[in-house]
Structures are given as structure tokens and as C-alpha cells.
Image: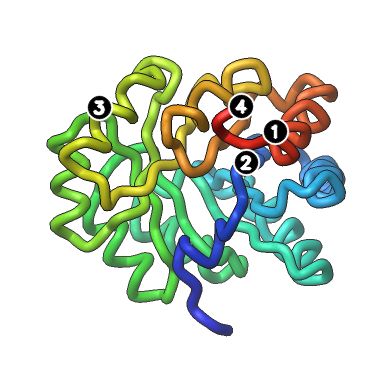
């Protein structure tokens, strides 16, 4: 299996769907719905072992459609191993743990660590991590991204935490490369509304 980086994983993607805590069949159904709407990248969190079957099922469904699925809420090296064994193509964490990043790299998985301060962002950058998850994005606000881009223009941010179709556009206009939406997907209309963002320029 070819090792990817986030430039290739996200490509021109602007939205990532986070399918958290769902049964296997519902995970696969929503992943398929996201892909049908042009939301190509899906994350399935695996904070607990009982979530791994949903990740594996989404990975298998994605392979049939040439879509990429990653593992979220990866908190330790054991979860990195579980995610890799399930076929995840990348890992995501809520915070910055360089041991987890290194474990993911050792398994050929790009890692997206969470940061909330310029200090954490600098630490990640020194470790060679240029794609970062800003969490919780709703608390940081769009202005945070514009401010951080001044001294750290080489970073690419995925905004996560409290986002939905109503506020995602403001983050994209602030320079965020990808918005990740999870809890809001409990509303069936969200995927359709998020897909509408794909047809719009980030500056509109």
C-alpha cells in the first residue's frame, strides 16, 4: 500500500466527515452518503476498541470506491496499531503527542495532531508536522487562523470542534484548508448543506 501525505489525502477537499460512535452499518451508510455528495475524506474515531469494527468497515467500503478513511481520536501507540491493522490511511488526535506521531509514521500513516496554541504549532512544526488539527476550532474562532498564518505561513490547518454547515464557511474564508464536521452530522440535512460548500469558492 502506497504511503500518502496530507497534500494527497485532502487534495482539493474542503470538508471531512467525522463519523463518531455509530454502529457499523450506519457508519458505512453515512460514509457512502458523504462520498456520493463529493465529501471524499472520512474519519472514524477509535477512542474505544468497540469503534474499530466501524473503522474497518468504512475502510473496506472506501476501498471499493477509491476513497480514503482515517482513524480519529488516536490517543496512544496501541490505538495507532489498531488503526493501522484496520486499514486506516491516516491518524488524527485531539492533542499533540509526538510519541503517537512517531508511532503513526513508523506504520506509514501521516498523523494529524491537535493544537490550540502557537507554542504547540511551533513544536509540531519542529517535528516536521505541517498539517495540524486546530481543536476546538469553535473556541479559537476564525480570527485565530488568520493571526497564526502571519508567523507560521507554512502550516496547513484542519479546523475541528463545533463546526457545522452554518459556520464552516467563515473558517474556510479565514484560510483553513479543511473543515471537519462530526457531531453536527446527527442532523441528516448537514451533509447536503456541507456539500454545497464544495461548489462555492472559499472567499465567497
Label located before the other in sequence (4 or 2): 2
Instruction: Estimate the x, y position of residue 178 in percent, counting from the top left.
Output: 52, 42
Label located before the other in sequence (1 or 2): 2
Residue annotated with mark 1: 197
Residue annotated with mark 2: 15
Q: CA distance from mark 1 to mark 3?
A: 24 Å
Residue annotated with mark 4: 204
Whether residues under marks 1 and 2 lie with C-beta atoms below 8 angstroms apart, the answer is yes
Helix, strand or loop at mark 3: helix
Give the quarter of the image for residue 77.
Answer: bottom left
Instruction: Estimate the x, y position of residue 90 in percent, counting from the top left.
Output: 50, 61
The figure's colour scheme reads rainbow
- Which residue occupies 56% across, 49% down? 49
Q: CA distance from mark 1 to mark 2?
A: 8 Å
Residue 47 relative to residue 118: left or right? right
Looking at this view, name the residue that lies furthest to the bottom. Answer: 1
Whether residues under marks 4 and 3 lie with C-beta atoms below 8 angstroms apart, the answer is no
Residue 42 relative to residue 139: left or right? right
Give the quarter of the image for residue 95.
Answer: top left
Instruction: Estimate the x, y position of residue 44 in percent, counting from the top left.
Output: 62, 47
Give the quarter of the image for residue 192.
Answer: top right
- Which residue occupies 21% across, 30% down? 117
Instruction: Estimate the x, y position of residue 29 in percent, counting from the top left.
Output: 86, 45
Residue annotated with mark 3: 147
Quarter placement of the N terminus: bottom right
Whether residues under marks 3 and 2 lie with C-beta atoms below 8 angstroms apart, the answer is no
Residue 175 relative to residue 68: left or right? left
Q: CA distance from mark 4 to mark 2?
A: 16 Å
Label located before the other in sequence (3 or 2): 2
Q: CA distance from mark 4 to mark 1?
A: 10 Å
Amino acid at each position: 500500500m502506497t504511503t500518502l501525505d496530507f497534500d494527497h489525502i485532502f487534495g482539493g477537499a474542503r470538508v471531512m466527515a467525522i463519523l463518531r460512535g455509530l454502529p457499523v452499518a450506519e457508519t458505512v451508510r453515512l460514509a457512502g452518503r458523504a462520498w456520493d455528495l463529493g465529501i471524499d475524506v472520512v474519519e472514524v474515531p477509535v477512542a474505544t476498541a468497540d469503534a474499530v469494527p466501524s473503522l474497518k468497515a468504512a475502510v473496506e467500503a472506501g476501498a471499493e470506491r477509491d476513497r480514503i478513511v482515517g482513524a480519529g481520536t488516536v490517543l496512544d501507540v496501541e490505538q495507532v496499531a489498531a488503526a493501522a491493522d484496520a486499514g486506516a490511511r491516516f491518524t488524527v488526535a485531539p492533542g499533540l503527542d509526538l510519541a503517537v506521531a512517531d508511532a503513526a509514521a513508523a506504520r506509514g500513516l501521516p498523523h494529524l495532531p491537535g493544537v490550540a496554541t502557537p507554542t504547540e504549532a511551533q513544536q509540531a512544526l519542529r517535528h516536521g508536522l505541517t498539517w495540524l488539527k486546530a481543536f476546538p476550532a469553535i473556541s479559537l474562532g476564525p480570527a485565530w487562523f488568520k493571526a497564526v498564518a502571519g508567523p507560521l505561513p507554512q502550516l496547513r490547518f484542519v479546523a475541528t470542534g463545533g463546526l457545522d454547515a452554518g459556520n464552516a464557511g467563515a473558517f474556510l474564508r479565514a484560510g483553513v484548508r479543511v473543515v471537519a464536521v462530526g457531531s453536527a452530522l446527527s442532523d441528516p440535512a448537514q451533509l447536503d448543506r456541507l456539500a454545497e460548500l464544495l461548489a462555492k469558492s472559499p472567499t465567497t
